[in-house]
Image (tube, coloured by chain):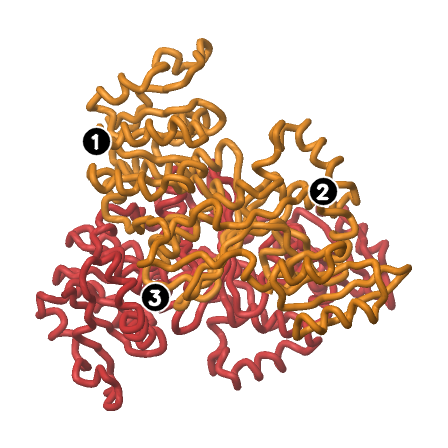
Chain colours: A orange, B red
Amino acid sequence: MKYIAIIGYGVVGGGITAVIEANKEQIKRTVHDDVEVKYILDLRDFPDSPYADRVVHEITPILEDESVELVCETMGGSHPAYEFSVQCMEAGKSVVTSNKEVVANFGDKLLRCAKENGVSYLFEASVGGGIPVIRSINTALAQDNITKIRGIVNGTTNYILTKMKNEGRDFADVLAEAQELGYAERDPAADIDAIDAKRKIIILTALATGVLLDDADVYAGTLRTVTQDDIKAAARLDAELKLLACANIGDSIEAFACPMIVPHTNPISHISDVYNGISVASDVTGDIMYYGRGAGRLPTAGAVVADVCAVLSGAAKYEYVPEFKKADGTTKQAKPFDKIEFTYYIRANCSKVDLADKLEAACDSVKIISEEGGIVEAVAGKMTAKTMSDLLPDAVAIRILD
Amino acid sequence: MKYIAIIGYGVVGGGITAVIEANKEQIKRTVHDDVEVKYILDLRDFPDSPYADRVVHEITPILEDESVELVCETMGGSHPAYEFSVQCMEAGKSVVTSNKEVVANFGDKLLRCAKENGVSYLFEASVGGGIPVIRSINTALAQDNITKIRGIVNGTTNYILTKMKNEGRDFADVLAEAQELGYAERDPAADIDAIDAKRKIIILTALATGVLLDDADVYAGTLRTVTQDDIKAAARLDAELKLLACANIGDSIEAFACPMIVPHTNPISHISDVYNGISVASDVTGDIMYYGRGAGRLPTAGAVVADVCAVLSGAAKYEYVPEFKKADGTTKQAKPFDKIEFTYYIRANCSKVDLADKLEAACDSVKIISEEGGIVEAVAGKMTAKTMSDLLPDAVAIRILD
């Protein structure tokens, strides 16, 4: 019998006990033993749960029980998730997590702590829910140099954008409905201001480069300003408006998360509803894309359990996980967002001639695409965000994915 | 230094030496040592290659050299690939392969041989080229029960169908061009008669169920009969015509590879050109799809090298790979193809009333979609292939993916 503990018994934590119970035999194929949840740490009690007698309110019994080999951290947030994870690893227990915030903020320290204590720290469920992108980057692409990552990594906002497109409704209206249905949080900022997407691209970039970028070095563009006009413009460009998290990896790292126009020729444009998609380009393998349920109780719990299996089978010890390191003189550096150049879709309240003149002075490629009722639309590039806003402070400008 | 050998120095074999040379440092991160190709077994010599002095024409020097830990089998075909692989494993060497034919035909024996000799037999590159679907099924979905697999797993035919659609050209014409360009083989039967796709669905099904189906138990439907009319009909149904390899896993296994009409609501319908896509549905994780380059020198070689890294790092010993077993009284059985029911697109040279009458007598759901110039089109289901052809022996009938 292998014993594990869960800290944070919310949606994902509850999914873990469900998966371990339902798919006992499948798990045994990999682990070659039964897996049992011995402790559940939560502030609450769960008197009606079959696990009621395993609930504890402090970390100490878990730390002191040597039979517990592994702890699933599914509490979310930075603190005390970080401290609990460190304590568990110092007590010789591996930790697996679905918590993107703690990995994006403290992944370097947590991986170092795992190494120092001879245990594993795995976080497959932190990006893309049930999509096995992290282990895949670490194993299938181990021999590759990754050059580009593009992801639709936030299901809530992808659902909102899909609804806006299909039903012609406004952002605020669809958001309110999503909140009512429980698809969006009461405080939706982490989703709609791209904070969640930013955390995920920080993690993916760290896997590809070893560099754990600072939160401040990755731009997050909000979805709050997106209108039906923008969505219709994307459709006219044979494209979709998506909240995209991107990294371009060269001598420096360009990483950002913001609404972008994605041409239909890019398969990621076809990912709709709550689904996530992550594409990775690398020198040997070329383009790969992963698609699946980026959130939800069972898919996310399944990804945690896959990590549990990797640890308890012994495989995790041999799996390659890069060390994460904050950028310094020895690593690649983040390119400041105001230095990154984009092609823009532009909608401005001026004359065609005026717009063309201004844009042609600022960039190489300018294409006026429509003029009607005093509104001119253009596609122009490449420009930095600063050039763009200095030039046309009142225009709508949306970045287009190359 | 870790030594390996390559048997079969064609396109993929050559790609392996190229990847190992170019991405030495990346590989070292995983393997923690340098990897060197010590022998290349091929019937030919390669006097201009930097590896000219490592070329051997017999397997014996490889078998006898104890420093060779692993052999990459990239020769293709069943024989002598099977015999060589067995000999290598009996000599204590792990074998990794890109050879779908030998895995589909002898995967059960080869995995047993690996187990008996305490070595690994891995075949990531045998399905989906650079797409890491096999390791992902074995690791990320280890805790899942897989219920459905759908794949566009043959790049050549997907390229032909994409060209037919985009350029309105006939099958024979596009095939001839693809042969000229080297995208299709001189003898194209394995691709266009779905033999290659059948081998790949046999392998994927074995990973999901442990049952290695017999070649004779998996239907392969040719693409030779596909016309522009069929492609246009799919477009009118808001769908694409694709060569699909499928498995439905329940009490029995329905496995087949044939041209099918795939609705645009299914993301696999958007996979075009030489790209491959494989979707897997399972009880915990839900729907996942993998997309990428299903063939080509570097992507396929990269997948072989990923397996090399898994073996040489020590991870492969702990990775779960199911035992493959031929169907028998203790396993799930293949459902005979003539018992599998499908929804069909039907185009017949008769009257609307006649067609409706016949179909309504045979199945529950019948929808006449057009009648023009004596040609009637319908969508009807569910029927077996036998019911369909008994009913309307001269009609065009194409299966529709649910």
Res A92 label = 1
Cα separation between marks 3 and 1 = 40 Å
Query: Which mark is drawn over residue B98?
Result: 3
Q: Earlier in the sequence, mark 1 or mark 2?
A: 1
The chain letter under disc 3 is B
* The label number, if any, that marks residue A163 in the structure image: 2
Comparing A96 with B327, the one in front is: A96
For mark 2, give the secondary structure.
helix
> Which callout, 2 or 3, points to the residue nearer the camera?
2
Nearer to us in this view, B259 or B330 = B259
Q: Nearer the viewer, mark 3 or mark 1?
A: 1
Residue A242, how many percent across, how many down?
A: 64, 51
Mark seen at residue B4: none
- Image quarter for residue B76? bottom left
Secondary structure beneath dot 1 equals loop
Q: Does B72 sit left or right of A202 as displayed?
A: left
The amino acid on which the numbered mark 2 sits, given as a three-letter code, is: Lys
The chain ID associated with circle 2 is A
Residue found 20% across the figure and 40% down from its top? A116
Which percent across, then down, holds residue A77? 45, 31
Residue B109 in view in this figure: no
For badge 1, the amino acid type reads Gly
The extreme right residue here reads: A373
- The residue positioned 41% from the left and 36% from the top of the image is A102
